[in-house]
Image (cartoon, rainbow, N blue to C red):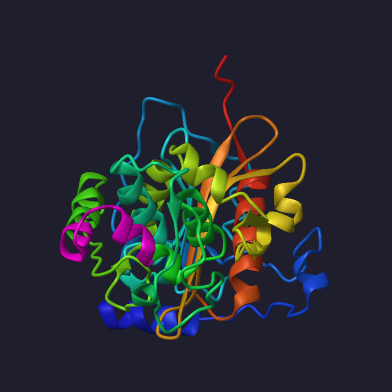
Amino acid sequence: MMRLLAQLVLSLAVVEMVPTSVPALESAHLPSAREEPAVVREVSRLLSPELPIDRALRPPRNADPESLGVITSAVSAIVVDKGSGQVLFEKNTGEVRPVGSLTKLLSAAVFLETHPDLDAPASVLKEDLRSGGRDHLYVDDEVRVRDLLSASLVGSDNPSTVSLLRLSGLSPEAFVERMNAMAGELGMERSRFVEPTGLDFRNVSTAWELVLLLRRVLEIPEIREATIKTTAEFTSVNRTYVVPTTNLLLGSYLNREPYSIVGGKTGFLPSAAYGLGIEVEDGEGHAVFTVVLGSESVNARFQEAKGLTEWAFDTYEWPDEN
């Protein structure tokens, strides 16, 4: 039976080709998106763990049962209705994978839990530097704590993230221990973290458990507000910093009426490929979480997240809660 399932999965492993140009990325629709065959949906349900649903709220209804999703290059993908917890799309949602800089969402939550003075002066020290990624701040250039937080969440700046750990007053071991404890409190039973930046491939989670993380951290104003900035701009005594976001969807139609991006974060590692987790609202107050992990390119993760999110809003009907 398992061999048959494996053969079936392999036979259906279609890779969606996506445009690589910025104009194509920002197009209002995804003409390359195709509906997923029903058999893929059934196989994904067999191979993915059952996901809990909060039945206190009525879940949305699939108004087009023949439309079963979007083919995606992502190894794992999920779309979840925020209100009810209903899974609207899933692909390998229980597969444990490195998550890259999506780790920084959890690190920010742990840091803010220490009740820092966000307006206190702070700077990146030489000891905070890490290889990998782009460094946006000069060493020893004094800014504010909130600027380091913004650089971490907006530009995915690794030295700024390490600086937050140092400024938390916790030892590296205690900080990571708290990261894992918080993950456990959120129900992220298969997630493990060994450092705060996401540079280590041993920081792992699943698509479903990242939804649990997004649900929690995007309730924190400092995190939510930072992750919807297209740039983080701040000044030191000597210069002005302009840190661009890594989340290009903030400049896409998915962040224009009737849609709005509530928050989110990108992630990348060579061993993990490209990932993204976002919360998006439509014009009627409905919201979904979309997570893709292991997309084949930087553009693919954005195209696929857009396609899945738009598909969910177009295909499902939410009941009138009034």
Q: Say if residue 279 shows up in the picture.
A: no
- Please state the horizontal and vertical placement of residue 220, each as a whole percent of the image: 43, 39
Residue drawn at x 45%, y 51% as measured from the top left: 121
As for residue 168 lying within the magenta part, the answer is yes
Vertical placement of residue 322 versus 243, above or below: above
Give residue 55's position: percent from left, percent from top: 36, 30
Say which residue appears at 56% left-offset and 59% top-offset: 154
User: What range is drawn magenta here?
Assistant: 162-176
Q: Position of residue 279 (x, y in %)?
A: 54, 47
Question: Which image quadrant for residue 18?
Answer: bottom right
- Considering the whole magenta stretch, tell me its main secondary structure: helix
The answer to whether residue 213 is seen in the rendering is yes
Left or right: where does residue 61 sit relative to residue 28?
left
Q: Quadrant of residue 113?
A: top left
Q: Position of residue 266 (x, y in %)?
A: 52, 65
- From the viewer's perspective, tell me whether residue 42 is left or right of residue 193: right
Let me know if residue 113 is in the magenta part. Answer: no
Quadrant location of the N terminus?
A: bottom left
**71 relative position to 120: left or right:** right
